[in-house]
Amino acid sequence: MQPPFTLTTSILHLLTTISEKLGEINAEGFRRPKAELRKSNRIITIQSSLGIEGNTLDTAQVTAILENKRVIAPQKDILEVKNAIAVYKRLSRFRPHELADFLNAYKLLMKGLISQAGKLRSSQVGILKGSQIAHLAPPGALVQGLIKDLFAWIKKDNHPLLIRSCVFHYELEFIHPFQDGNGRMGRLWQTVLLMHFHPVFEFLPVESVVKTRQKEYYKALSLSDKAGNSNIFIEFMLGAIAQSLDEMLAQSRKRPNASERMEIFKQSIQKKSFSRKDYMAQFKDISTATASRDLQGAVGKGILSRKGEKRLAVYRFI
């Protein structure tokens, strides 16, 4: 199997652009984002990918589920988020070229949602747009062979992994190997593939860009179907990756405000008591006066408790 696509001028330009942005990330030490950025980006990734499929939960509700807090929402939506959290926690364990790992990820992602979780479909399916069939997937009898061929190709092909990951994503949507959840699996497995190209992709929320450009995403899939190759979809996904890298660079360079600093420090110190000096050791670029204002403000808001006064004060998160 050789999926049909060609390296257009636009695709080559996007490859160069992405390489330059990854170079900036390497130079500025963002290969693995800070803990607070990893957490927020993971939440955005999960919320966005499920939101594309119609899940109604927002980032605050996804955060609450991640922190084992009670959320009032449709049970199906809650279960989708819980499953996605479980899968994304295991990202580094999945072997990108192993079909067994791919099916195991699907089983975890769709657990309790469909009866065929973890299994390839055997029946005919089509994608409706209104009352019209927008895409008629290959017959169920061909699915297993097509997926095996796709995994064999992605393992042996010599094109840049950025290209191969986009082609894989498109081909997976074309084959539509599952009863449900094909879109979220395509986005998930492209991440698994790209993690082996650069570690930043584990926490890069490309899905957020795709969600904001959702109509373009589906249009790129449709136009690629009509063209008989994945060029248009490759260009779209490379553009989304480039945009997401831009946003991560801007986010990483942004100096946190007082409330953001307090949340970051809470993750670090947890329930231990601490002094102003300990707080300043975490944020070396703030002054003593700024640290005092941060701590005093948090005490006033009921976020911190305080014993003692001024530099001898000891704080603890409530």
Image: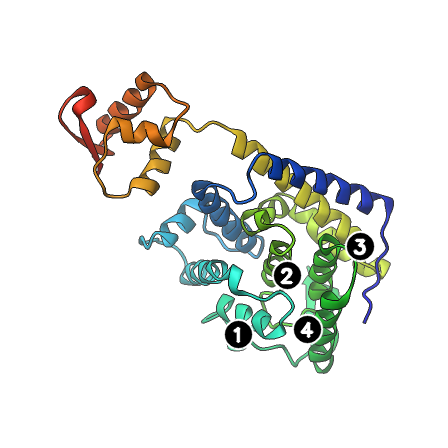
Tell me residue 312's x, y (percent).
17, 24
Task: Quickly name the residue at label 4.
Answer: 125
Residues at marks 2 and 1, CA–CA distance in whole angstroms: 15 Å
**Residue located at (82% from left, 68% from top):** 2
Relative to residue 203, is residue 186 drawn left or right?
A: right
Name the quarter where the C terminus is drawn.
Answer: top left
Q: Quick one: 151 or 24, which is closer to the camera?
A: 24
User: Reading the chain from its start, which is encountered first: label 3 or label 1?
Assistant: 1
Front disc: 4 or 2? 2
Looking at marks 1 and 4 on the same chain, the residue that comes earlier in the sequence is marked by 1
x 36%, y 30%: residue: 259
Residue 117 tag number: 1
Q: Please give the name of the residue rendered at 13% of the width and 25% of the height, measured from the top-left corner.
A: 308
For the image, the number of numbered tags is: 4
Mark linked to residue 255: none
Q: CA distance from mark 3 to mark 2?
A: 18 Å
Q: Hey, which residue is sitting farthest left in the picture?
A: 308
**Alpha-carbon span between mark 4 and mark 3:** 19 Å
In the rendered image, residue 272, in percent from the top left (x then y), is placed at 23, 41
Q: Give the residue at mark 2.
A: 186
N-term-proximal mark, 4 vs 3: 4
Q: Label 3 belongs to which residue?
A: 223
**Three-letter code, disc 1:** Ala
Q: Nearer the viewer, mark 3 or mark 2?
A: 2
Q: Amino acid at mark 4?
A: Val
Occupied quadrant, residue 267 = top left
